[in-house]
Amino acid sequence: MYKAIISFLLFTLYPIAFFAQNQNCNCCIYGTVLDKELGNPIAFATVLIKSSEKYAITDEKGNFKIDNVCPETYVLVISSLGYVELTTQTQQYNSGQASNFYLTEDLTTLNEVTVNAEGKKEKGTQTISQIKLNKADINTLPTGTLGTSLSQVEGVSFAATGTNVQIPIIHGLSGNRVLVLNNDLKHGFQNWGSEHAPEIDINAVNNITVIKGAGGVRFGPEALSGVILIEPNPLLLNKELYGNVGIGLESNGRGGNTNFEIGRGTEKWSYFLNGSFTKIGDRFAPGVNLTDEEIANLQVSNLGPTEPRVNLTNTGKEEFAFSIGARHRVDDWDFKAYYSLVDQNLGLLFASFPDSGPALSRAFDSPVPLFIDSFSYDISSPREKTQHHLTKAEIDWFYADDAKFTFRAGAQLNKRQEFAIRTSSERSEQNPIIDLDLITYDYQLEWEHPDWKGLDGFVGFQYFTQNNDNNDGTFNIPFVPNYNTFRYGIFVVEKLNIGSNTLEAGIRYDIETNDVRGENNVTREIFRDRYTFSNFTASLGYQWRISNNSSFKTNVGSAFRTPNVAELFSFGQSGFYSLFGLLRIKTDENGDLNANEVILLADSDVEIETGYKLTNEFRTSNETDAHAITTYINYIENFVFDRPIGVTTRFSGPVVVQIVDQEDALFLGLDYTWKKEFSEKFNTTFGLSYLWSRNVGKNEPLIRQPPISTNILFEWIEKEFWIFDSCKFTLRPSYTFEQFQAPRVIPISEVIDESTELTLESEIFDFINPPDGYFLLDASWSFKKKNLEGGLAIQNALNTRYRNYLNDLRYFADELGINVLLTLNYKF
């Protein structure tokens, strides 16, 4: 099947007519290629006259034209990557007539789709490598997280703190360097540290697009590595009443999820309503053979020398989510409104909080957690409790066929509480150690101007503000101070089509002010700091249509990021470690680390973080093979990262101390995908991701960088199999290599007894060696029977014992063992 890179553009829904000149072979065939389900135009689809060399490529509005044809009947073959190929008899057309052709999405090629579901998000990023996941991909694990859903994409992984908290990583970068846009708004959450994941209900997500490049011009600061676009229900008009009721069960954790969605669209109105609930108990890791000494080290010794599984105490999860949306279209105006709520209670491994220095040392050396209790659904301290509200209103004014104004306004409330094990009687575990309210407002105005001298683009303005406040009752110096952030941004993005190729450029200017108010940990006096950063970001890219089946994209972009308040002012415990920010720690006259005063930003050498990323993507395909390779170089000036520096004692016991550091860093890597179609029923997809990173400021390795990973997906698709309308069988073996670029190791025992001297200038180190490489095997079977869909999946089918280098809790426990999942969905 001929394949081409596709992109949706939602702005113009009407075909442009092309007129035939006469009744001889100077005639033409023209029309518009559309998505059958959404009705959106499909750009860069191939329209081929069968048994002929004549073909055309659809433009960004889905239109095509084949000139110099005779007035007779032809067979057109229309194809686009990610869609089922369409063969249609095309009759002779009279001048002035145009026809619409509809393609149906091919779910078997989702790993290769590189488009956005709506054209407005494609603008400004068309020349950057992109991957799209749709609802069928996302809902394979209804009890999972955003991080686990995205991990199937080459170049994307996730950092984790245990089993419930995962944050996406794109090309080695995470946190504030990966911009998460939830329903067109920057997701306003406590985005610092690997223990803070975005509160996203994956059951309410319709599409996810991963942009693997610097997208700062189009979407704003902090997109140094990439952007994750999360799209809810599209609120389609003229859609009959529909609904879905689903359930998902999993064996590891004895948990489940139930979810529903209902909606309807008329000529002028549309609405949807969905919700979900997830409850999971303690997870388990594979069994292990223990020695008598190892059993004696356990605080709860209900394990024998050989156990089929190891219970991970206090790793349960409870999540409730709800969202609603409405749309009204009248004349040239389109109004949309959304609201969503995600409420989470997430357990953290109890054994990650040892009560003494020797226990901490034993925990790092033990093959199993030091505290193991029987299975329970209870979630006690340590745990995280979060609640995220999002509301948004959007207005589109289509004042011309090829132009419009868009105004959107959003407000978000993020409430976060973190609970630790507390030993003091006056400080109950019912009192959180961190209690924060974050309020975010986001206002955006965009003008998509009419085509002007071949330029197609838009101008935008954004006002963004956040207010973060600490609540009383923690009995702690606040981990982060109260602060207000104000940001103004203006940008211009233009695209020029040069034949079938595209040149794209953009520039943006942002100015950000932060007003910080906190408490000194020694004097208990209030300190204040106010600082302003401003910067230009730019992007330049080119998309080259080499041939009907091959294309090349190149894009160079810059983005900047103000170090967040946690990186600057963090003080104290968060999760199982204590973190000290760039402005909270220094070396005193004796060479000892001192965190007794706050440094004002103007008196420090802290600089803004600025990244320059070059991405290149080459894609080629024929009837049976498709290859995609993406290479990238990302140089970041003043790269901010945290690293271990020692151990200290808190009220809950000893904790690892980490400091925030800043150096220049370099990231090089590639993502490769090869899909082979052996037949209409059977295909395979091979994926590889490689990253090399370096602290070039000190010429040493960085810590917590993704290792090399590979996987192969085998898919067998059967239609009308047994009693089912269709079935799909998949097998996915994968191998993750040991991280060979890890920093040096200093055993935790040497840090505790201070036999190794550590200063702010010490080389980066880790407490244990990176874990060995590991092989995993996943399998699944899915079916469709009329309105009923379902499936059975097995994760870690071989029950492999392994530890993930990107999981902070690898110091204390193995990853999850075998997990069997059952899903059922009834649609009407």
Image (tube, rainbow, N blue to C red):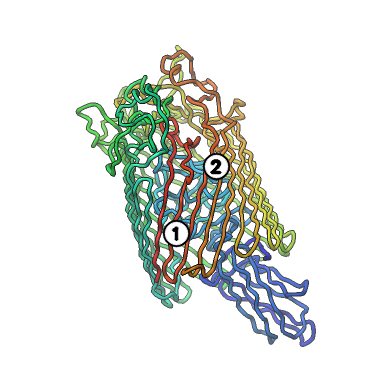
Q: Tell me which residue sits at (52%, 23%) in the image.
A: 745
Give the quarter of the image for residue 304: top left
Q: Which residue is mark 2?
A: 560
Q: Tell me which residue sits at (43%, 18%) in the image.
A: 749
Question: From the viewer's perspective, is residue 200 above or below residue 753?
Answer: below
Amino acid type at image mark 1: Gly
Q: Which residue is mark 1?
A: 791
The numbered mark at residue 319 is none
Q: Secondary structure at mark 1?
A: strand
Q: Position of residue 779 (x, y in %)?
A: 50, 52
* Residue in front for this viewpoint, 517 or 647: 647
Q: Tell me which residue sits at (49%, 68%) in the image.
A: 722
- Relative placement, left or right, of 578 versus 86 is left
Image quarter hosting the N terminus: bottom right
Quick one: label 1, few (<14), some, or many (20+) residues within 10 Å? some
* Residue in front for this viewpoint, 567 or 77: 77
Amino acid type at image mark 2: Phe
Q: Nearer the viewer, mark 1 or mark 2?
A: 1
Q: CA distance from mark 1 to mark 2?
A: 44 Å
Report the residue that reaches farthest toward the right: 25
- Relative placement, left or right, of 346 versus 21 is left
Question: From the viewer's perspective, is residue 675 above or below residue 308?
Answer: below
Q: Secondary structure at mark 2?
A: strand
Contact, mark 1 vs mark 2 (Cβ under 8 Å): no
Question: From the viewer's perspective, is residue 406 above or below residue 815?
Answer: below
Q: Position of residue 185 (x, y in %)?
A: 45, 54
Q: Position of residue 172 (x, y in %)?
A: 55, 40
